[in-house]
Amino acid sequence: MIHIAETIAVGSVEGFLNPKERARLAAVMNGFLTEETRTRFGTQRTTSIHEIPGHSQEQAMGVYEPAGRVEVPKIPDEAEQLLQHAFDRARPALSRVMPSITACRPWTYVEYGPGQHITSHLDGIAPDPLAWPRQIAGISVVIHEAEAGGAFYVESTSNDLLWHTRLDHDAQLHGYAGGSGWLTTEPTIPPTGTRACPAPGGARAPHRAPPCSTAPSSPTAPNR
């Protein structure tokens, strides 16, 4: 079970990739993303890494990426190895924020163009909290700094209405409330918004952080 503090943590790892590694990662992805592959993983794509239980992939894409984006769910082997090596190297720093982390799932490449963004959302332990490997956080790395936009936006609040006051300790649920619902649904609570523009090569590792990016070109390598 993860600790409650990990469900609201937002951390960063400066220098997650050094300049040489970032340049190599950019070169690998630039070589992979020909005009044909960019179209295949962009406007022609019909699947998404995001899921909404009870809804189709098309519906999920419409909610999370209403203006589209480039999304490559399986990046080239060299890029994957480079990022996994960086994750292993950064484990001590990551573990200070989220000690329950044991491994890093395969990375995904995403890129936003003009007018594109990711809809604000909660990254939960899901969609199935009992599925293995259990997702407890997301991590992403900026490869190129956007000419404009590209900010990472986090909303937070201390309002008591946001939190359930009772946890279901049923052993069959592994200590989670049904559907991993730590949070209630209360859209009227006014949040505090924080914008950040992470430096290229740095990593951000949020659990519940809604990023909102609009940029001429803002490629990142996120891991869910």
Image: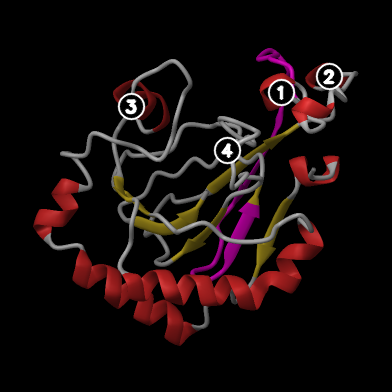
**As shown in the figure, which amino acid type bears the numbered disc 3?**
Gln
Q: Earlier in the sequence, mark 4 or mark 1?
A: 1
**Label 2, residues with CA under 10 Å away: few <14, some 14-19, many ≥20:** few
Marks 4 and 1, how far apart in space? 17 Å
The residue where tag 2 is placed is 164
Mark 4 or mark 1: which is in front? 1
The dot on residue 57 is: 3
Residue range of the region highlighted in magenta in the rendering: 183-205
SS type, badge 3? helix
- Earlier in the chain: of badge 2 and badge 3, it is 3
* Residue 164 % position (x, y): 83, 19
- Image height check: is 6 above or below 80? above
In the image, is residue 199 part of the stretch drawn in magenta? yes
Quick check: marks 1 and 3 in contact, CB under 8 Å? no
Q: Are marks 3 and 4 in contact (CB under 8 Å)?
A: no
The residue lying at 50 percent from left, 54 percent from top is 223
Do the residues bearing badges 2 and 3 touch, measured as CB atoms within 8 Å? no
Furthest-bottom residue in this view: 20
Tell me the number on the disc at residue 210: 4
Q: CA distance from mark 1 to mark 3?
A: 22 Å
Residue 21 locus on image (x, y percent):
44, 82
Secondary structure category for the residue under label 4:
loop
Q: Position of residue 75 (x, y in %)?
A: 33, 62
Measure the alpha-carbon separation of dots 2 and 3: 30 Å
Closer to us: 41 or 210 = 41
Give me the residue at 28% from left, 74% from top. 28
> Mark 2 vs mark 1: which is more N-terminal?
2
Q: In this figure, which residue is indicated by the disc labeled 1?
A: 181
Res 81 quadrant in image: bottom left
